[in-house]
Image (spheres, grey):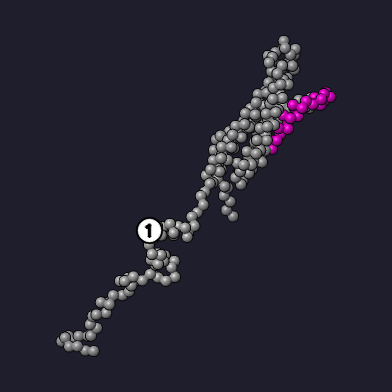
Amino acid sequence: MARERVKPSHYPFIPFHLLRTAQLVSALVVASIMFYFLWHLTHDHYRLPWTFILLLSVSLLTILSLSATIVLHCCYGLNPRLNVSLNGCLLVLWSVGFALLSWWSSGTLSHVCNKSNWEDETGVMVCRIYKALFAFTLLGFVSTFAAALLDVFVFRHATTRGKYDKMQNIDEKLAFDAPDSVLGLDPSSYEMQKPFSSQPARTSGATGYAAPEEQFNYDTAYQGAHHTNVL
């Protein structure tokens, strides 16, 4: 059986896949860092910060959303209305997570990652991980925001191209095209000009297609060699 055709996509190829790649990379990095931090905090019996839980949740939801929508995009065609709803929800979560991370780790981010500030190599490594977490959280927020804007643009463009005008009624079209109705002439003459009239128009001299009578006015008798008529 022939492979079914996929509905053409309204998304521009390069911006669509570039933004999705940025979303995927940022979500993978943030999720990896969150798993690392949460595992160590749980192992040392510390409380889990709500900021870490939120960032882990939004990164996993982003990976799940990208996986589901790429399957829809390749197999059935991605609906811009669905994608703008998903990216809108993710944008809210990325915004809250980025704001909480910026407020919670502002002291760490403002310091240089060296031994004078963090005492040993472990502290320096934690400082660098925090800064990487901040950078990729910012990337996730910006890429999701840009993806939502692209969804809105594509959705409005697709909706604009889908608008149509009401078709004109056949009776109204005939009434508009008829010159007699505009000029106020005899309606009976207009009835004679209707293409769907039950009685065909009869005009003098118009007999349609017929064989001319002149083709029967010729002699059919046989004349012999001596020009004698033989019936």
Q: Quadrant of residue 122?
A: top right
Residue located 65% across and 39% down the image: 85
Is residue 28 in view?
A: no
Residue toward you, 180 or 77: 180
Residue toward you, 107 or 45: 107
Q: Is residue 212 above or below residue 61?
A: below
Residue located 23% across and 89% down the image: 231
Identify the residue position indicated by label 1 in the image.
183
Residue located 68% across and 23% down the image: 134
Q: Residue 172 at what x, y percent from top left?
A: 47, 58
- Image position of 95 (left or right of 204): right
Neighbours of disc 1 within 10 Å: few (<14), some (14-19), many (20+): few
Q: Residue 100 at what x, y percent from top left?
A: 72, 25
Residue located 53% across and 43% down the image: 160
Q: Which residues are magenta?
A: 41-64
Q: Main secondary structure of the magenta part?
A: helix
Name the residue at the bottom extreme.
Answer: 231
Q: Residue 179 at what x, y percent from top left?
A: 38, 59
Name the residue at the right extreme.
Answer: 45
